[in-house]
Image: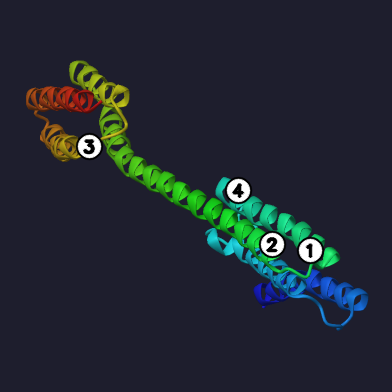
Amino acid sequence: MKKRKTNILWMVLDLIFLIVFNVLFFSMAGWADHPASVWISYGFIHGSYVLFILTPILVAGGKGHETAQGYSLYTIGTAYFMIELVAGVIFILLHPADWKAALIIQILLLAVYAFALLSHTLSDEKAAAREQRLWQEQQFTRAAVTRLEAMQEGLPDKELKKLLERASQTVKNGSRESNPRAQVLESGMLYQIGAIQRAMFSQEEGSAEKETSIFLRMAQERDRLLRQND
């Protein structure tokens, strides 16, 4: 119910400009015959306002979605509407008999707006995809470090604890980005952590140290693969 009421208020707010503009237009210019340049400008002004209202829909979350992308897209829509409003009002006031200049100029303004909006949207989508990929890649580092540090808690074997600390530090200091080749090794590293845990549960300290040493070699190999990719 509250959301419906909010939507209605937004619709009323959006209609204020259209109502005021049309009242001013028809009260001052009347319904008399106007040249095509006036009606072209009238239509483009309304069209730019509709695009201005629809701009937030291009952003996840709609109105009030406070992100850098949201503000940028909103700025593009606002700039286009304000420029078109000025250009349209000038043509309405001058009302030239030749309609070609009004049409060409306002089509060019629309083209610039469309280019800016689409290029910015594509750029943001590319950046968002990269952030998502980076977040997924970093999941390995988080999972490996968390499990290695958990095994160190309350561990009486000092040598094994030092090896585990070295292993977790090696992962922390390694690259947080990844690549397909390294991801195959990362799966094996997570499995290797399980082998360390199984050895510790069996209270086989020597075996746990051996498995940890294998993990360290795998971590070093991962770093080598990622350096090759640079």
Residue at coordinates 89% horizontally, 72% vertically from top-left? 24
Mark 2 is on which residue type? Ala
Residue 4 versus residue 156 in the image, above or below: below
Dot 4: element: helix
Residue 21 drawn at (x, y percent): 83, 71
Q: How far apart are marks 2 and 3 (CA)?
A: 54 Å
Q: Distance between the residues labelled 4 and 1?
A: 29 Å
Nearer to us in this view, 176 or 86 = 86
* Residues at circles 4 and 2 in contact by the CB criterion of under 8 Å: no
Of labels 1 and 2, the one closer to you: 2
Q: Distance between the residues labelled 3 and 1?
A: 57 Å
Q: How crowded is mark 1: few (under 14 residues within 10 Å), some or many (20 or more)?
A: many
Q: Mark 4 belongs to which amino acid? A: Ser
Whether tag 1 and tag 2 are in contact, CB under 8 A, the answer is yes
**Spatial CA span between label 4 and label 2:** 30 Å
Residue 179 numbered mark, or none = 3
Task: Count neighbours of disc 2 (C-alpha within 10 A) and say few if under 14, some if 14 to 19, many if 20 or more.
Answer: few
Residue 167 place in picture, x, y as percent: 23, 23
Image-based side of 76 in relation to 15, left or right: left
Mark number, residue 72: 4
First-in-chain label (2 vs 3): 2
Residues packed near mark 3 inside 10 Å, few (<14), some (14 to 19) or many (20 plus)? few
Can you say whether 136 is above or below 16 in the image?
above
Question: Disc 4 or 2, which lies upstream in sequence?
Answer: 4
Mark 1, residue position: 91
Residue behind mark 2: 101
x and y, in percent, of residue 220 in the image: 17, 22
Q: Which amino acid does label 3 sit on?
A: Asn
